[in-house]
Image (cartoon, rainbow, N blue to C red):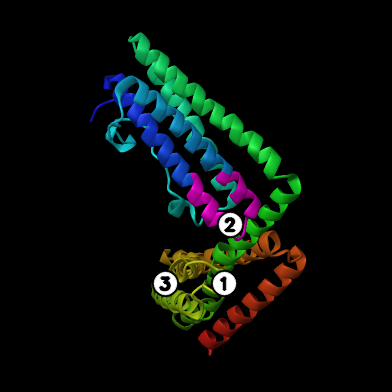
Amino acid sequence: MPTLSELSEREILALAIATEEEDGHIYADYAHMLQEKYPDSAALFREMAEEENVHRRQLIDLYHERFGPHVLLVRRQDILGFPRRKSAWQMKNRNISAIRAQAEVMEQQAAQFYRKAASLSRDAGIRKLLGDLASIEERHRHEAAQLENRLVTEDVQAREDEIGRRDFLLRIVQPGLVGLMDGSVSTLAPVFAAAFATHDAFSAFQVGLAASVGAAISMGLAEALADDGKLSGRGSSLARGVLCGAMTFAGGIFHTLPFLVPDFHLAFTLAVIVVAVELFLISWIRWKYQDTPFSISLVQVVLGGALVFGAGVLIGSS
């Protein structure tokens, strides 16, 4: 695979044309993807796509003048070290700020790459061409910033950030928190019931592991099958199911692992400490992302955990 410095002027210009065409297509895809929820940012990307098309036409005119009408097919993936692009579909689950940042990275990477290649070239013609391309990409970056300042005002950005925050809550926080709460609380009863019934740490670990795995499968399936995400806007049911199941398992296994310690009393003490940490973490997440007052959240979560814990101890001691 050749490097940029090994290409001829003609090949470099053909590569620039293909790059501008691809970037323009990506920006147009961003605009289409964002139109429904983020119309102002969609307008920004439509203008950026048009700018890329203008520059592509300018490069084609230059190519035609220098080398004739036939444009060689030279793609970025054929050149060693050339920056790759993420298509719109690869960014569909990212928030609006990440998508804007990706657009800036696209322009910055291209400018840096051309500038570096120009500094390594000893051919005056290639050096000038690469320098011109670097200037074009750097200008794109400034133009994008100007367009964003004009189209995406503070009010618009605040509104779009709130939409992104709500999507994050629905797609990530909610299924993850449900799983963590279920795994941390529901498995308390079987784990501590087994501990008090047998006074054997490893037996309690086996019960806790089984309960964690069973709860993870159950919660994962329940989350995935309850809502396909099409009407609620909560995203992929598979992704939510996997996330919910994983967090359920994590919530159950954390206070089960201490029972790998052979000494039963030490294992029990460590497990109680881990449970306290888990309940505190759940309360913090509810306060952080669901606007629940921390004191109220802590009381609610600790009360629920205490009831389940007490039930396990009573059943195991009977």
Residue range of the region highlighted in magenta in the rendering:
27-46
Sooner in the amino-acid sequence: mark 3 or mark 1: 1
Crowding around mark 2 (Cα neighbors within 10 Å: few <14, some 14 to 19, many 20+) is some
Q: Which residue is mark 2?
A: 35
In the rendered view, would you say 71 is above or below 132? below
Q: Which residue is mark 3?
A: 205
Looking at the image, residue 202 sits to the left or right of residue 94; the answer is left
Q: CA distance from mark 2 to mark 3?
A: 51 Å
User: Would residue 174 be visible to someone looking at this image?
Assistant: yes
Crowding around mark 1 (Cα neighbors within 10 Å: few <14, some 14 to 19, many 20+) is some
Residue 93 x %, y %:
50, 57
Q: SS class of the residue under badge 1? A: helix
Quarter assignment of residue 168: bottom right
User: Would residue 277 be visible to someone looking at this image?
Assistant: no
Looking at the image, residue 164 sits to the left or right of residue 105; the answer is right
In the rendered view, would you say 114 is above or below 267? above
Q: Which residue is mark 1?
A: 178
Q: Residue at x 73, y 71 (%)?
A: 299
* Type of amino acid under label 3: Phe
Q: CA distance from mark 1 to mark 2?
A: 31 Å
